[in-house]
Image (cartoon, rainbow, N blue to C red):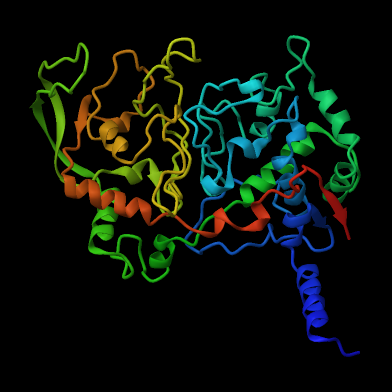
Amino acid sequence: MRYPPVALLLVLLVLAFAASPALSKVTGVITITRLFNYADQDIPSYITQDNTPLNNPITDEGATLGRVLFYDKRLSADNSISCASCHQQEHAFSDTAERSEGIDGQLTNRHSMRLVNVRFGDETKFRWDESAESLEAQMTLPIRNQAEMGYSGEDGGPGFDELIEKMEDTRYYPKLFKMAFGDSQITEERMQLALAQFVRSIQSFDSKYDEGRAQVDSELDDFPNFTASENNGKRLFFEDFEWVEDEHTPRRRPNARNASTDSFLAARRVGGGFNCAECHVPPEFAIVPDSLNNGFVRPSPPGRGNPVDLNVTRSPTLRDLVHPDGDLNGGMFHAGAATNINALFAHYDFRQPNDDNTNLDPRMIKDGLPQLLDATRQERHDLIAFLETLTGSNVYTDEKWSDPFNERGDLRLQR
C-alpha cells in the first residue's frame, strides 16, 4: 500500500511512539512486556562497593513497581505528595528546600538527602541518624511519619492498613505486585523491597571523573582529561595533611556575637592534602560505615524541630553534589543549611570542637587538637573544580527514573 507524503509521516510517527518506552511518560502508560532495564545496567569495573542484600536483588519487575510507588501521591494521607516530592530527579533525587515539607505544609526536622548511587557503598544503614537498619527499612518510614506522608495511625489519622486497602482499590497495583512477586498481595514488606530496588537502580557513572578514571591504572594518577586545577583538587581530596601543633588566635567574624578570640592550640596543616577521602571513599565517594558526627551542631531555629543534633553520622555520596549547571543539588548537611561549596570550607577548614559533642568523629581532630586546614584561595578553587567532575548527566533525564504518571495523576498498564 502506498501512502501520500502526509499520511506516511503520520504513520511513521505513530510507529515511532509505539516502539518507544518514552510513550509511558507522555500518556501515563507502562508496557509490562517491555520494561526498562534496571537489573543489568553497566557499572564500571573499578566500582566494588555494593550494599544490595542477597534477599533483594534488583529486577526489572520489582524496580518498575518501585518506580510507581516512588512517584504515587496516593501514598500520602491527603494525596498531595510522594517520595519524589522531596527526592526530585532534576536535583539528583534531593530537595532544594532547607527542610523538606510533608503533608499540610508541615516541615520535617531534616533535609532530604540525595539518593544517587546509594547502592554503591559499604554503609547499610540509612537516614541521617542511621535509625533505619537498611534501605528496605527506610522505604516506608516516611509513609508512616505523621509529618511527612501521614499514614501513622496517630491522632485519629489513617494507619498503614488503610493505605493498603487504598492501593488494593487501584487498577494497577494488584497487577504490578503480581508481576513483581508472583501474586497480587500487597504488603508493607513487599513495598519496601520494590522501593529499595528502584532506589538502588538510580546510578550515575557518566561523569568527567569516570571518563578520566577509565583511562588510567590508578585513581592517584593524573587524569588526562582533567585540567591542572582539577588534578590538583583530586590530589588535595585524596592526600592526608601534614600538620604541626601551633597556637591559633581566631579572628572575630563580622556581626558575630560573643565570639571568643582567646588563643588555643590547633593542628595546623603545613603540607599535603585535606584527607577528604578517608571518610568519603573513592571511587564510589560513599561515606564509611563507622563515621560519627562531623562537627555540624547548629541548632534548629526556635520552635522548628530538633535542638542541636549530635547523632548525625550518615552522608550521601559526593557524586552529583553539584548539578550540571553548577548549582548545588540542594543544601548540604542534615539541616540543608550550607547552600554553596564554600560553606564546606567554612565548616571543615577550621572547626573548634563543641564541648557538648560527645559523638564527634575522631578524624575531625588530631591528637585531641582541632584541625586547621589553612586552605589557600587557589586550593579551595581546585578542590571545588574536582568535586564538580563527579557530576554526571544521564541521571537527571533518564526516563526509567522519571514520573510514570500523566499530568492528571493517572496510570494505565498495557501489554
Instruction: Report the side of 200 relative to 94 (left or right).
Output: right
Query: Residue 28, image x and y in percent?
Result: 78, 52
Q: Is any atom of residue 55 visible in this view?
A: no
The residue closer to the viewer here, 52 or 347, is: 347
In which quarter of the view is residue 358 placed?
top left
Vertical placement of residue 367 versus 319, above or below = above
> Image height check: is 240 above or below 110?
below
Q: Position of residue 230 (x, y in %)?
A: 28, 58
Residue that appears at 67% across and 19% down: 146
Give residue 340's position: percent from left, percent from top: 35, 39
- The spot of residue 30 in percent (x, y) is 80, 55
The C terminus sits in image quarter: bottom right
Q: Which residue sits at x=12%, y=17%? A: 261
**Residue name at image x 17 percent, y 23 percent:** 253
As drawn, 389 above or below 307: below
In which quadrant of the rendered view does residue 18 lie?
bottom right
Q: Is residue 199 left or right of residue 204?
A: right
Q: How many marks?
A: 0
Above or below: residue 106 compared with residue 182: above
223 and 243: which is toward the camera: 223
Q: Is residue 127 left or right of residue 170?
A: left
